[in-house]
Amino acid sequence: MPSETLRLRIAVQKSGRLADRSLELISGAGLRVMKGANELLYRIENQPIDLLRVRDDDIPTFVADGVAELGIVGYNVLAEHFPEDDLEERIVMRLGFGKCTLKIAVPDSVSYEGPLSLEGKRIATSYPNILGKWLKDRGVSATIVEMRGAVEVAPRMKIAHAICDLVSTGATLEANGMKAVDLVLASEAVLIKAPHAPPADLAHVYDMLLRRFDGVTASNGAKYVMLNAPREHLNEIIELIPGADAPTIMPLAGREDTVAVHAVCQENVFWDTLDKLKAAGASAILVLPIEKMMK
Ligand code: ATP
Ligand code: ZN
């Protein structure tokens, strides 16, 4: 029997907050996922790639050990695993989803005047390494109480004075009578890579994958804007287009005083911006979604 051909592995969260968006990125890159009988490993039908589906906490180690060549994980999880390392060496790209912040929170009734307010206090967290480093950098000595979950109930249960936990909307904190008072870490999903290069036979697949992930990530939320602008207000109008670099300027047939402007905007374009463009003299404004982009 011929031996199984080499396949690349991407470690992804099996279920949870990053799972769906990770799969979207993967299918956005043109990979067809076969959800087979094997729950741990999904095959990609049209490329020599498998998805290793695990708990997010296992992803940094699997990728560092080369069990998977690539992985998609929260920056917070990566930073907690390798508190002393230069994380940029492990990160291939930031993915723009799974955004959240690790914050210090205290009960509503407690006043907070900066990190020194935590001196001698007990702080509950699932991120002892990140918090320990943050406190040390600020010259604060406090007791870290490690909890796996339900960190937000710690003050009420008199387990801790403060907590350090992930926050996205603040609703959970509010429901527990607490307020966020300081930022420890801003996080989003990141693509990480193994320390060694991929097997030579798979180098082209690996490179293609990175190029496509970059394309999908770059086009996320990006818009294509087309409008007509009077020449005399051209600079002003270009400045109003959010995150546009090097727009294309084209003459309009039979209109000496007006040009067409086409630009890729890296950010969302809101009605407010359209109003300003209109007020500056732009007309025939179109904002189109971008499906794919390769730089
Ligand atoms: P697993 O079962 O894989 O261990 P988990 O319970 O540890 O999952 P999830 O709650 O699914 O993790 O969160 C995964 C990641 O999603 C977090 O590590 C973080 O990077 C990101 N995230 C985005 N928003 C939030 C939020 N509001 N709360 C927690 N995590 C968030
Ligand atoms: Zn986890």
Image: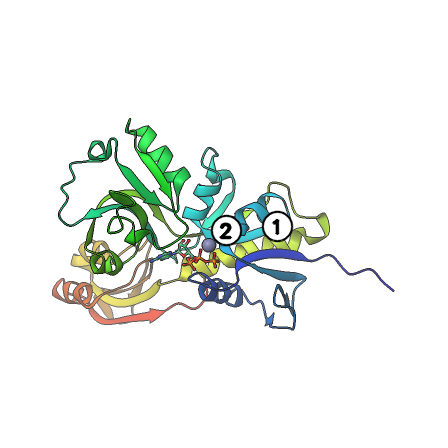
Camera-near label (2 vs 1) is 2
Q: Residue furthest front?
A: 158
Q: Which mark is residue 69?
A: 1
Q: Give the amino acid type for the residue marked by disc 2 in the picture.
A: Asp
Expressed as whole percent of the image width and height from the top left, the position of residue 192 reads 52, 48
For residue 268, the mark is none
Is residue 187 positioned above or below 1 on the image?
Answer: above
| Label 2 near ligand 2 (CB < 8 Å) | yes
Residue 251 x %, y %: 30, 64
Of 165 and 259, nearer the camera is 165
Q: Write the residue at 21% across / 31% down.
A: 116
Disc 2 is placed on an element classified as helix
**On the rendered structure, is 227 left or right of 11?**
left
Classify residue 152 as left or right of residue 38: left
Compared with 180, 118 (above or below) is: above
Q: Is 105 in front, or is 123?
A: 123
Residue 294 visible in the current orientation: no
State the residue position of label 2.
Answer: 57
- Which element type, helix, strand or loop, lies under badge 1? loop
Q: How many numbered badges does the structure rendering display?
A: 2
Q: Disc 1 residue type?
A: Glu
Packing grade of label 1 (10 A; few <14, some 14-19, many >=20) is many
Q: Under 8 Å from ligand 1: the CB of mark 1?
A: no
Picture layout, residue 104 above or below residue 30: above
Residue 250 shows in this picture? yes
The percent position of residue 80, horizontal first and vertical second, equals: 44, 42
Dividing the picture into quadrants, the one containing residue 115 is top left
Q: Nearer the viewer, residue 142 or 99?
A: 142
